[in-house]
Image: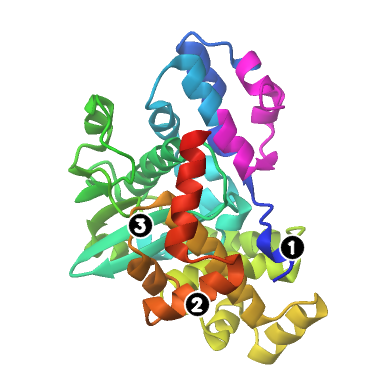
Amino acid sequence: MTEDQKKDNAVIRLATISHLPRILEDMGANPEQVVKSVGLGLNAFEDLEYLVPYTSMGELLARCVQATRCEHFGLLVGQQIIASGLGLLGFLMQSAHTVRDALEDYMSFAGLQDQGAVSLLNSINGVTLLSYSIFVEDVQAEEQIYDGTMAGHQNIMRGLCGKSFKPTEILLSRPRPKDTTPYDRFFRGPIRYNSEYNAIAFHTRCLDAAPVRTDPLLYDFLKHEVEKKHAEQPQTFAEKIRPVLRRLLVAQACTLAETAAHLGLHSRTLNRRLQAEGTTFLAEVEAARYLMARQFLLGSTQSIAEIASIIGYSDTSAFTHAFRRWSGTSPSEWRAQRKNTDVKD
């Protein structure tokens, strides 16, 4: 595994949280001073295409919490996120044929907005989870990011399904806050803290409904524009397929054929393009597994066996062997070492 495969230079579009300076100001903090502390200027929030490293966004939210002493600052930011705030992708979602189409586009073209995490739809027994998992290491304020994203997801679902939309449950990996009032007031549904996942749960029947603003003709036009913009992203081919691999791994469908089909390519073409960049499909899958394993080990309470299953290993011993090959230590030892380091820091 090369250093380039280990490293993930993920970025996020700052316009998604363009209202952050106003929230800081409303809470009595100095927006210019706070954003400057992470190397940004207020003008960056006015640029619809401005990208920042995903880790910088985490650092910014951590500074916001410090400046405002508000432990639910991320939730406040997320409450302002709506589909149209996602730019072209958001308008595509609003005009989709069905809510399912809208959310599948959201996941397929998420790289236009957010390259540091993966969203996934999973339906079982009449309930669907729209989850969000960060796959960038050493991100500060993960709890704030997850709070904000779940709030944003709820707003997006309300925008698609109508104001009467209500989740069946909100799952947050954060510990239960001392004051749950802000969460109860916004989500208006059952909240499960200390969850293994960060997700919004809702009735699966919602997926087959038409969005409130459905417009099939506009949808077809926007889909072409979004696909073109996605193809023009300044990324190598390997960088483009990595978010796809992560989603397929979690969906237990990460095969060469499935990946190629997802990208609209023949398997031989996919292999050839990766080889031209000095990598292989197997190497990219291994890199994705290693990255996801590290993030789950640090960012969740899931057992080693559960993590092994999520990233495609049939048994714990196979995962442990692979992880030892990647890192030189076992998953449990790596988790303990990293958490001990974090406590000392």
Q: CA distance from mark 3 to mark 2?
A: 32 Å
The residue located at (46%, 12%) in the rendering is 26
Residue 338 visible: yes
> Percent x, y for residue 212?
35, 50
Query: At label 2, which amino acid type do we have?
Result: His
Magenta-colored span: 33-60
Query: At label 1, which amino acid type do we have?
Result: Asp
> Which residue in the protein does label 2 denote?
321
Residue 154 located within the stretch drawn in magenta: no
User: In the current view of this chain or complex, which residue is farthest to the top?
Assistant: 28
Is label 2 in a helix, a strand or a loop?
Answer: helix
Q: CA distance from mark 2 to mark 1?
A: 23 Å
Disc 1, disc 3: CB below 8 Å? no
> Percent x, y for residue 316?
38, 76
Q: Earlier in the sequence, mark 2 or mark 1?
A: 1
User: In the current view of this chain or complex, which residue is farthest to the bottom?
Assistant: 268
Direction from residue 188 to residue 339 in the image, left or right: right
Q: Earlier in the sequence, mark 1 or mark 3?
A: 1
The foreground one among 246 and 159 is 246
> Which residue in the protein does label 3 denote?
130
> Which residue in the protein does label 1 denote?
4
